[in-house]
Image (cartoon, rainbow, N blue to C red):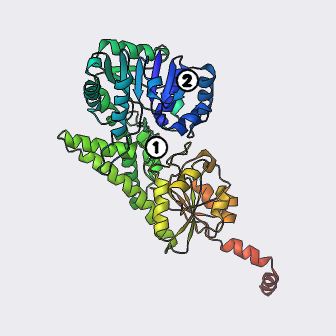
């Protein structure tokens, strides 16, 4: 099928190359000519495992192309995906300006029947707005352009896998022809047995909100639990392991830490709460979810402050700035927010991240950066582990210990084995578990002194 994908950000680009991989003819439309040139040259503008490969394959086969010209992309497309950004406004509502612009471009250039699919994460009710916009722009096309909702459930860092092996495909559609076109589009996946939900548009829109809000709620529950565990001397990782053994709860998204970040959960929770209010329901639970998330970050900040007394004149090594591992995305990254709190309190912050440093430095130029974790830790009074990259799980703790000024490690993601960290000579503070003091260095000091002339004289006296 001929497909047009408007917006080549995370969702749009992954959708475009994945649909090309499934055999469709895809044109990616983006208003930024620089981005289009980068994509035509086969370079993905952000890091996502497997994306470069699919992009290269799509370009080589000719099944994917990019343009900034709507007149070249829209005519002839049977399905037009709207995947443009919906950033939060100061009010907490999602800004839908780009969605309206994309809709108008489709209405202006469409030549025949097509399905206009909202795939950007949008507040419920947006499909109706899209329909109205089409009717206003081109009343004569009102019966030919059918609006549908097809929310995505892809995670950054696993976006290709989530798209090509989805745990569900959700399509909200109310016109029989449009429903048939979308079933045909996804046939290569449904033939492999991936579940396909066909619902009304309102149901699909609310289902997307519900999934993200529920996942965020699980994380906030774990973070609230962490605070109680700290006060009670319990270990939250064990508590959540016990909870997760119950299949009704399951162990996923119960990791306490710095809280959730990224471009989805923080804005989606806020937008859903606002939408509920507009619809006449006070979703206080979601405000509590957001508050617990803020609290998780401030609790880690307080831990660092407590461990270091004054933050002025202190050097802090921040390991991981991406909002989660396997991405270079720092939007709403809790690690970056923590760095900003530390900088504001007068500390020097030296960051290391396997992929996200350029983005982090662009957003926060006061940050210093280091080429590896050990260089970041050189002379540091505290090491704070903020993102659970695989590389950071395999740190050489003895080497890290040799680099630091003070052996204090805040494991803000409970990534490391506290026994190993303590054995390497660190005092370790996790989240929701008792702090563990490094073995007092007296023994080591005594052995060191015994090797010197003073020590030898003292031995003789003894
Ligand atoms: C999320 C959802 O998982 C996707 O299903 C959804 O499609 C996407 O939002 C979206 O709406 O576009 P994503 O933002 O890529 O995906 O990241 P997640 O893997 O969900 O992680 C979100 C945040 O929660 C990260 O900061 C992560 O560190 C944090 N998290 C996750 C925890 O703090 N604890 C956990 O146990 C799990």
Q: Quadrant of ligand 1?
A: top left
Left or right: 443 in relation to 196: right
Task: Say which quarter of the image contains residue 87.
Answer: top left
C-alpha distance separating marks 1 and 2: 44 Å
Against 58, residue 112 (above or below) is above
Report the side of 119 relative to 407 (left or right). left
What residue is shown at x 45% (from left), y 46% (from top)?
262
Residue 244 pos. (x, y %)? 43, 39
Can residue 95 be seen? yes
In what element is the residue under mark 1?
A: helix
Front of the two marks 1 and 2: 2
Circles 1 and 2: CB atoms closer than 8 Å: no
Residue found 66% across the figure and 63% down from its top: 401
Which residue in the structure is indicated by mark 2?
A: 64
Residue 157 visible in image:
no
Q: Residue shown at 46%/53% (left/top)? A: 334
Q: In which quarter of the view is residue 118 placed?
A: top left
Sort mark 1 into few (<14), some (14-19) or many (20+) by Cα contacts within 10 Å. some
Q: Which mark is residue 241?
A: 1
The numbered mark at residue 347 is none
Q: Position of residue 27 (x, y in %)?
A: 50, 24
Mark 2: few/some/many CA within 10 Å (<14, 14-19, 20+): many
Query: Which residue of the protein is positioned furthest toward the bottom in this rendering?
Result: 461
Residue 339 at x, y = what percent?
A: 50, 60
Q: Quadrant of residue 50?
A: top right
Q: Earlier in the sequence, mark 1 or mark 2?
A: 2
**Residue 183 to residue 326: above or below:** above
Q: Residue at 69% across / 72% down in the picture? A: 443
Relative to 67, residue 303 above or below: below
């Amino acid at each position: 099928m001929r497909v047009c994908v408007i917006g080549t950000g995370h969702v749009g680009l992954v959708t475009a190359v994945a649909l090309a991989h499934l055999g469709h003819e895809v044109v990616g439309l983006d208003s930024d000519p620089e981005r289009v040139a980068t994509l035509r040259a086969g370079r993905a503008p952000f890091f996502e495992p497997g994306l470069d490969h699919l992009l290269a394959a799509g370009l080589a086969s000719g099944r994917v192309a990019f343009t900034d010209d709507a007149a070249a992309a829209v005519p002839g497309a049977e399905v037009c995906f709207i995947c443009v950004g919906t950033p939060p406004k100061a009010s907490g509502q999602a800004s839908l300006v780009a969605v309206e612009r994309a809709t108008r471009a489709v209405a202006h250039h469409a030549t025949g029947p097509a399905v206009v699919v909202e795939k950007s994460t949008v507040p419920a009710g947006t499909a109706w707005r899209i329909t109205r916009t089409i009717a206003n722009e081109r009343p004569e096309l009102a019966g030919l352009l059918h609006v549908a909702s097809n929310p995505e459930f892809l995670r950054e860092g696993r976006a290709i896998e989530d798209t090509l092996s989805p745990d569900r495909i959700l399509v909200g559609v109310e016109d029989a022809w449009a429903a048939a076109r979308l079933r045909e589009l996804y046939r290569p996946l449904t033939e492999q047995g991936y579940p396909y939900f066909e619902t009304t548009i309102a149901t699909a829109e609310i289902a997307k909100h519900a999934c993200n809000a529920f996942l965020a709620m699980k994380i906030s529950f774990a973070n609230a639990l962490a605070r109680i565990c700290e006060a009670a001397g319990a270990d939250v990782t064990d508590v959540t392991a016990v909870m997760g053994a119950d299949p009704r709860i399951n162990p996923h998204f119960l990791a306490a830490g710095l809280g959730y970040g990224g471009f989805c959960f923080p804005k989606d929770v806020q937008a859903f709460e606002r939408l509920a209010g507009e619809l006449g329901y006070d979703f206080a639970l979601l405000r509590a979810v957001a508050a617990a998330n803020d609290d998780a970050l401030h609790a880690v900040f307080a831990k660092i402050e407590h461990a270091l007394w004054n933050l002025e004149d202190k050097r802090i090594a921040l390991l991981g700035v991406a909002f989660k591992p396997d991405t270079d995305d720092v939007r709403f990254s809790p690690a970056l927010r923590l760095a900003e709190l530390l900088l504001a309190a007068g500390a020097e912050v030296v960051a290391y991240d396997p992929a996200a440093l350029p983005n982090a430095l662009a957003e926060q130029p006061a940050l210093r950066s280091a080429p590896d974790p050990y260089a970041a830790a050189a002379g540091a009074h505290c090491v704070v582990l903020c993102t659970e990259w695989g590389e950071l799980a395999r740190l050489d703790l003895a080497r890290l210990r040799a680099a630091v000024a003070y052996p204090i490690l805040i494991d803000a993601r409970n990534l490391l084995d506290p026994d190993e960290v303590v054995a390497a000579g660190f005092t370790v503070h996790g989240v929701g578990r008792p702090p563990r003091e490094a073995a007092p260095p007296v023994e080591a000091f005594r052995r060191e002194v015994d090797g010197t002339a003073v020590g030898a004289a003292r031995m003789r006296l003894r």
